[in-house]
Amino acid sequence: QVQLVESGGGLVQAGGSLRLSCAASGRTFSSYAMGWFRQAPGKERDFVAAITRGGGSVYYADSVKGRFTISRDNAKNTVYLQMNSLKPEDTAVYYCATSRYSGSYVYTSPADFGSWGQGTQVTVSS
């Protein structure tokens, strides 16, 4: 079992930046792909970004492409989400997750992720 703890959320004005972190423990971090998802009130949990276990491949939702950057530091068991040019529609609870599978693929469906953090709130004011 893996434990994930997100941090870095907060309140920011539109156009601003935030960097989310997700620290993992309890399993070999570098063996699994990681992802970020978000959920706004009354909406489903949506894919934001994902990264392969080695960090060589990344994938983004169209809504964040060019503004968000996912990265990982396997030596620190941490995955990051750098969010720039934030918009009010980015307001949501952001979750990190670790893939169910240890392959070298990037996953984008919530069903492919088995462990989730508790989430961190990001609020973007207009």
Image (spheres, rainbow, N blue to C red):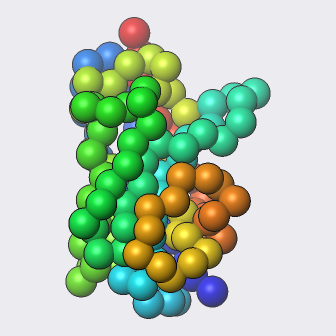
Q: How many marks?
A: 0
Report whether residue 29 is seen. no
Q: Residue at x 37, y 67 (%)?
A: 52
Q: Quadrant of residue 110?
A: bottom right
Q: Is residue 65 left or right of residue 43?
A: left
- Give the camera-side residue of 10 and 37: 37
Q: Position of residue 83 (x, y in %)?
A: 30, 38
Q: Residue at x 41, y 75 (%)?
A: 104
Q: Is residue 84 left or right of residue 29?
A: left
Q: Position of residue 11 (x, y in %)?
A: 40, 30
| Residue sitting at the far right | 42
Q: Position of residue 95 (x, y in %)?
A: 54, 52
> In the rendered image, which quarter contains the N terminus?
bottom right
State whether residue 120 is above or below residue 76: above
> In the rendered image, which quarter contains the C terminus?
top left
Q: Position of residue 62 (x, y in %)?
A: 42, 30
Q: Residue at x 33, y 25 (%)?
A: 86
| Residue sitting at the far top | 126
State whether residue 48 is above or below residue 115: above
Q: Is residue 63 left or right of residue 3?
A: left
Report whether residue 10 is seen. yes
